[in-house]
Structures are given as C-alpha cells and as structure tokens.
Amino acid sequence: MPTVTATQATDDETPAPRPLAGRHALITGGNRGIGAAIATALADLGANITLAARNEGALRTQQDILSRRGDIAVASQRMDLRDPDSISQGAAAARENLGPIAILINNAGVAPAAPLAKLELNSWRETFDINVQAAFLLSQALVDDMQEQGFGRIVNIASTAGLRGYPFVAAYVASKHALIGLTRALALELAKGPITVNAVCPGYTETEMAHNAITNIQQSGKSEAEARAILTRSNPQGRLIQPDQVAAAAGWLCLPSSAAITGQAIAVAGGEVM
C-alpha cells in the first residue's frame, strides 16, 4: 500500500521559490541514483512526490529522507515496470493518494551488458519492457490528468546511448533510441495542448549502473582508477556526471516557464555528444 508523509517549513526559514507548488510528480526508479536526485529537485521546487519502484524498503527510506525537505507530501508506490497491470494499478493508486498527476519522470532503466552472441532474448525483451514500454504505458495512463489540469510535463531519462552507439549493450542502446523516438512522437502529438515531452540524456553518471560497469572493467585486471578512466574517456570533461546535474536539467524542463521546450533530447554529458 502507498504511504504518505508531509512536513512543514519552520517559521524562521525564508521560503524558496516554489513554481511547482501543488503539482503532483510521479518518478519511476525514484528510490536511488538519478531518480532520487530528481525527486529532491522537484520537491525543492514545491511539487508533491510519488516515488515508484519495486523495492519497497528502499522506497520507504528515500521517502523518509525526502519528506524532511519542506512543505510537501511524499508518497511511495510499489510498481513493477515489467508488468502492465502493476503499472496501471500503481498509477491509479498514486492518483488516488495525492491527486491528479501533472509531472511524469520516466527514469527507471536497466542496462544488461553482453556481446551480441550472448545477449538472451528474455534480457532484450525485459530491457524494452522497462526502458520503453513502461514510459509509453505511464504516458498513456496520465495524459488525461495533465490535459484536465491544463499543465503537463513528461520527462524521459534516456542516455547518450540514445544519441550514439556503444558496444556490448545493444539492448540498452536500442531501447534508449526508441525512448527518444517516443519522446519526439508524443511531443508533436501533444504540442497543441499544455503538455511538453522531453528527454534528458546523461552520459556515464555516478550511480549504481556506472559502479557496476567499473566493477566489470576491473575483472579484466584493471584498477578502479584505470576503470574509471576508461569509463570517462569519451567525456571531454574527463569525469562522471553527478546525479544532481541530471536532476537540474529535468527540473528545468518541468517549470512553467519551460512551456516552449518540447521534443528535445538534452545531453548532460560534458560535451560527449553535440
């Protein structure tokens, strides 16, 4: 069952600008990494937050952390993005809990690594289920909420892998290209109304996914420093992207003042793609 917490700012605090006050944001994969950073950014802009993921324990932990940030409501909702029924039921429960949803952050993703000859069909399908199909189903489920409110923001967290290729992650690259295609199609379809649809495309980011890649590289005999150098060599700035840098771009796209920005795939990658 979803849970909700809310906190009040103390009297001696100077209120920060809250352009998203009263807006309900649903964030998949909101319990860690980029998703948790985006949840924090949107909460600081005043949005009420529903964190969605499979791991209920991690959801509750992140909910507790987020609920301390100000006068907002924070809910957690278990949702298995491989299961269309879980998606539809989770979206309905989130709506019932905190009201109509105005902001959708499709952040959850998986990135199985394997050469083509060893990439299993089930892994390929699951990657598309989570990285693309879930974004489609949630967008479809929530667009009426946004139309009725006269305000909607859909932000798909894609990747530089949606803008270029990488070896040994064919399913991930293909799914992120598909996600950007979905972004552009929906942006045009919804352009006459109050909804914008955009993608944010991080390069390698300091998250569990990057740490797993570093561990895999170390198995070839490289040190952690050497593994990090390999991972960041395509970034002209020579470093991993930080989750809050991705969150800043996502938060900006959700602002009322960003109403003219739609159909974009914005790279947050230190100049890796231009």
Image (cartoon, rainbow, N blue to C red):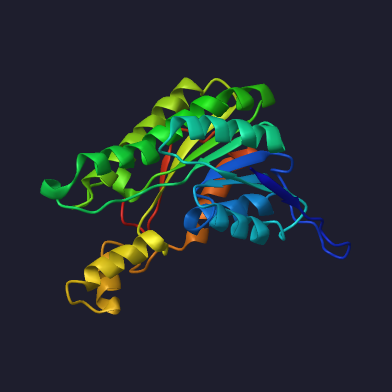
Q: Tag count in the figure?
A: 0
In this view, the residue farthest toward the left is 117
In the image, 191: left or right of 95? left
Q: In the rendering, at what x and y percent does residue 256 appear?
A: 64, 38
* Snapshot quadrant of residue 100: top right
Question: Which residue is outermost to the front?
Answer: 1
Question: Outermost residue, right direction?
Answer: 11
Q: Which of the two residues, 132 or 247, is positioned nearer the viewer here?
A: 132
Rendered residue at 48%/55% (across/down): 34
Q: Residue at x 21, y 39 (%)?
A: 121
Left or right, 126 with reference to 169? right
Q: Position of residue 95 (x, y in %)?
A: 65, 33
Q: How far across and how far down the image is residue 41, in percent?
A: 61, 54
- Residue pictured at 53% horizontal, 26% vertical: 141
253 or 68, nearer to the observer:
68
Residue 92 placed where, x, y %? 61, 30
Say if residue 236 shows up in the picture.
Answer: no
| In the rendered image, the vertical position of residue 176 relative to residue 41, given as above or below | above
Residue 116 visible? The answer is yes
Q: Is residue 224 above or below residue 94?
A: below
Q: Quadrant of the N terminus?
A: top right
Q: Is residue 189 above or below residue 70?
A: above
Q: Name the residue nearer the viewer: 142 or 75.
A: 75
